[in-house]
Amino acid sequence: MGSGDDVKKVMSRRDFFKGTSVALAGVAVASVLPTKSNAGDLPAAYAEPKCSGWSWEKPVKKIGKNEIVKVVDSDVVVIGAGLAGVVAALSAAEQGASVQLIEKNNSWAARGGHIAAFGSKLQKQIGVKPDYRQIIRAWVAWAQGRVDEKLLWDFAHKSGACMDWMMDICKKNGLSAALWEGYYKGPDYTEYPVTHFFHEAGANLAYVNGSTKGVGNIILLPVLEKTAKEKGVVFNYKTPAAQILREQDGRVTGVIAGKKGHYTQYNAKNGVIIATGDYASNKEMVQRYSPFSLRADAQIYFPNKCNTGDGMAMAMQIGGSMQKHEPHAAVIHLEAGAASYGFLHVNANGERFKNEDVNTQSKSCTKELQPHGIAWSIYDRDWAEQVKQQVDSNTAGGLFYGQTFQPWGQGWDIKMEKATQQVHLQQGKIVEAGSIEELARKMDVPVENLKKTIKRYNELHEMQDDPDYGKRSQLLTKINKPPYYAGKLQSTVLTMCGGLHTDSSLLVLDKDDRPIEGLYVAGSAQGDFFANDYPTICPGIGHGRCLTFGRMAGIKAAGGDVDKLIPSLKM
Ligand SMILES: Cc1cc2nc3c(=O)[nH]c(=O)nc-3n(C[C@H](O)[C@H](O)[C@H](O)COP(=O)(O)OP(=O)(O)OC[C@H]3O[C@@H](n4cnc5c(N)ncnc54)[C@H](O)[C@@H]3O)c2cc1C
């Protein structure tokens, strides 16, 4: 199902484990460099959109009884051992259900580490209490209402208790939770302090070299797997799900999985939970549901290319439908070189084109609209002091790559950020020059245009006013002290944000909004939660929903009462 040609380097097993430890939202690793060599070259799939005949629409021949070598009975079957699937399996097992988890790879899946939750005991302990109702209102506005608002409120009410549950499990296994303080604090674009991450005691949280040990989801998943196994969950690795079993227009009864011709039929008395992740590595699905995403410079995922939309295709083949709102949003972040600073941005013509006081997602998408999809972020010798001043005065912030795991109360570390820049310079992600002319040549932009643009930007700084693009005066910085730096903005697709049509029952719905009994969905296979754009106002919401809805789906599939078992946050 997956496409095979859009990431230059096929990742080895070593890379995969490295990737799981190092990759964070917004931090693409060096081994997956842009696929567009020449400006303006679009992937063929973008240039030639097709309108019908999608592979998942074609009738599928049912797997015959003669191809099934084994039948396994259980209460709940979970497909996919990512965060959503393992949380769902463990939550179902805690309710006494017998659970079979089937996973096509030879291990669980993890990447990044930011996890959003509202009102956890950690937030209470630190004394952080943002206006949670305001966050949901802002999120609905971000999506322009094209989501199931009840799902958003379920997240708001239940995510804190789900985080507490996970913190307890982690504590028993020697992991600590921290709240991330590196969020963006601007008055126009604002992020909220809802982002948690887990780390081992004494772990070095610096991310200067694009890797770290003892922090993030790579240390969380083994703990969840171990706990789930202790509760009786059976992990079936190297077992790809092939077909979901549904009685004629009725309930889902199980899954057929395993090797072609030698399948196992996993019967599920109570229900099947789809937790197979998104479809960003399936170019056909991206073309169908989110063609703009094909313009990004690169696409990465760990384990490599496992997010091929299998769960969605299998559900659609038995009557499930995708969310109604299209095109789907996508997580498209900036690659590390240019960080997410609010400095001057210029395009391939050396001209400014935007107010840079926005989130990383907005920057990476806007630059795709520029000539040849090229843009640069430009700053001078004083850059780090300028960023520090903005961060310390709570006027900005962002994804700072060296301190992606900046714990609450530690402060923004200027030395760490400078060290990260040095690494990016060595990697060629940033160019350095002694003059603007030299910088322009290194960037391959017209020298005179760049000089004119920088002159104008310096005038705006003098005026402390930006009539051209309306940027806040606090973020206007002068560019007049060599060395000068330019970081190339590289857009990278992490995950797609659309998925299977559902509502707060977490059952997959058909195109007429009727639930398919016994078929649940959780994690990034789930739709109706995001629209238009990934709401970076809530950093870590991708993992946050895996935790919250994974737990809710597991409890529901086991027949438990979510409202009794997951206390609601009083807002
Ligand atoms: C580099 C990177 C960094 C990220 N960092 C963050 C972050 O810090 N915070 C955040 O909120 N989000 C982050 N994200 C996004 C986030 O990781 C995902 O949205 C989320 O983890 C998805 O979890 P999941 O359990 O739904 O799916 P996955 O983690 O993709 O798990 C799905 C599993 O299902 C398996 N599977 C698929 N098809 C089948 C099949 N047919 N049979 C059996 N098994 C199957 C897959 O192999 C996989 O193991 C990041 C994404 C990337 C790419």
Image (cartoon, grey):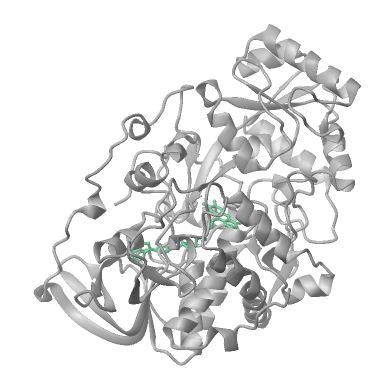
Judge whether residue 460 can be spotted in this image: yes
Residue located farthest toward the bottom when viewing the structure as drawn: 96
Residue 568 percent coordinates (x, y): 65, 80
Which residue appears at 46% of the width and 82% of the height?
556
The answer to which of 70 and 509 lies nearer the viewer is 509
Which quadrant holds residue 123?
bottom right
Which quadrant holds residue 18?
bottom right
The answer to which of 396 and 509 lies nearer the viewer is 509
Along the horizontal axis of the image, is 368 left or right of 513? right
The answer to which of 30 and 307 lies nearer the viewer is 307
Judge whether residue 434 can be spotted in this image: no
Residue 229 percent coordinates (x, y): 47, 83
Residue 79 percent coordinates (x, y): 37, 71
Which residue appears at 74% of the width and 66% of the height?
178
Residue 219 percent coordinates (x, y): 59, 67
Q: Is residue 37 above or below residue 177?
A: above
Which residue appears at 60% of the width and 60% of the height?
541
Q: Is residue 164 above or below residue 132?
A: below
Q: Is residue 151 above or below residue 17?
A: below
Along the horizontal axis of the image, is 113 left or right of 280? right
Which quadrant holds residue 306?
bottom left
Q: Is residue 554 above or below residue 303?
A: below
